[in-house]
Image: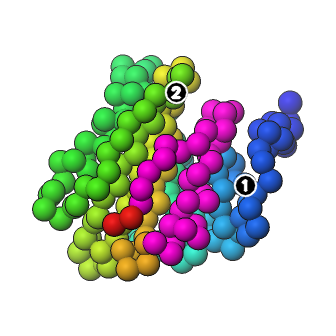
C-alpha cells in the first residue's frame, strides 16, 4: 500500500475540522492545527528511543527564540524493547524533569490521570516563569498506549496574560479531539482557568 493510501485511510474516520483548522498527521497521531500556523517536524532519539517532535505556532521560532504560543507533540515509541520500560513508565520518565525542576517557579494547577482500555491519560497543567520570557501557562495531555508501547505527549502553551483567549480560540479545539494510534480520543475534561 502506498504512503498516500495509508494516510488517506487514517484521515477517513476523522470528523470535518472546524473552520480555520486542518487535520495534520504526525506519525500515528492526528491533530487539529490552525490552517495559518507554521509547523516543523523532526525525528531524533532520546536515550536510544526514537522520538518524533511536531511543533506548530503562529510565530516564527528557533532554538534560541522559542515560541510563546503553540503546540508541541512528542511521540515516543519502542520503550519496552529498547529501555525495558512500558509506556506507562515512560510517562513518569517524561514528567520527572518537570517535577524535579525548581517548584518555586512552577505553580502546579492540575494533575489528573485516567484509564480507558489500553490508553492511560495524564493531564498536567502548571505556570512557568522561564528566564527572559513572559510567564506562561503550560498544559500537557499525555496518552500512553500500553498495547502499542507508544506515548503521545501534547503540550499547549501560551503567555498567562492571553491564556483564556488562546485556550478558547486554539488550545481547546486542538486538544479536544486527537487521533492517536488509529483511535479518536477525547482529552480528559479539565478546567484551564488560572
Instruction: Left or right? Give the position of 134 relative to 121.
Output: left
Residue at horizontal 48%, vertical 47%? 189
Q: In this view, does 63 lie to the left or right of 134?
A: right
In the image, residue 153 lies at what x, y percent? 46, 45
Q: In which quarter of the image is residue 112?
A: top left
Q: Earlier in the sequence, mark 2 or mark 1?
A: 1
Residue 97 coordinates in the image, percent (x, y)? 25, 47
Over which residues does the magenta segment extend?
164-192
- At x 32%, y 51%, the residue is 110
- Residue 188 to residue 146: above or below: below
Q: Which of 89 and 127 is in front in this view?
A: 127
Residue under pointer 1: 23
Rendered position, 54 above or below 178: below
Task: Identify the mark at residue 116; answer none if there is no mark.
Answer: 2
Tag 1: Cα neighbours inside 10 Å, few (<14), some, or many (≥20)? many
Mark 2 element type: strand
Q: Which of marks 2 and 1 is in front?
A: 2
Q: Distance between the residues labelled 2 and 1?
A: 24 Å
Q: Find residue 111 and report its image quarter.
A: top left
> Quadrant where the N terminus lies?
top right
Looking at the image, which residue is at 47% across and 60% down? 156
**Is residue 189 part of the magenta span, yes or no?**
yes
Q: Which residue occupies the foreground of this view, 40 or 138?
A: 138
Residue 65 visible, this angle? no
Amino acid at each position: 500500500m502506498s504512503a498516500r493510501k495509508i494516510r488517506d485511510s487514517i484521515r477517513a474516520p476523522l470528523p470535518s475540522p472546524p473552520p480555520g483548522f486542518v487535520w495534520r498527521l504526525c506519525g500515528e497521531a492526528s491533530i487539529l492545527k490552525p490552517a495559518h500556523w507554521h509547523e516543523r517536524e523532526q525525528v531524533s532519539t532520546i536515550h536510544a528511543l526514537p522520538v518524533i517532535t511536531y511543533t506548530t505556532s503562529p510565530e516564527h521560532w528557533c532554538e534560541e527564540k522559542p515560541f510563546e504560543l503553540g503546540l508541541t507533540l512528542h511521540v515516543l515509541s519502542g520503550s519496552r524493547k529498547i529501555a525495558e520500560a512500558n509506556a506507562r513508565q515512560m510517562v513518569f520518565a517524561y514528567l520527572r524533569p518537570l517535577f524535579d525542576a525548581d517548584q518555586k517557579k512552577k505553580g502546579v494547577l492540575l494533575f489528573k490521570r485516567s484509564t480507558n482500555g489500553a490508553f492511560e491519560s495524564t493531564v498536567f497543567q502548571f505556570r512557568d516563569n522561564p528566564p527572559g520570557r513572559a510567564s506562561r501557562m503550560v498544559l500537557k495531555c499525555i496518552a500512553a498506549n500500553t498495547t502499542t508501547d507508544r506515548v503521545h505527549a501534547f503540550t499547549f502553551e501560551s503567555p498567562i496574560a492571553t491564556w483564556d483567549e488562546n485556550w478558547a480560540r486554539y488550545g481547546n479545539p486542538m486538544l479536544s479531539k486527537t487521533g492517536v494510534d488509529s483511535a479518536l480520543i477525547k482529552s480528559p475534561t479539565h478546567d484551564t482557568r488560572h
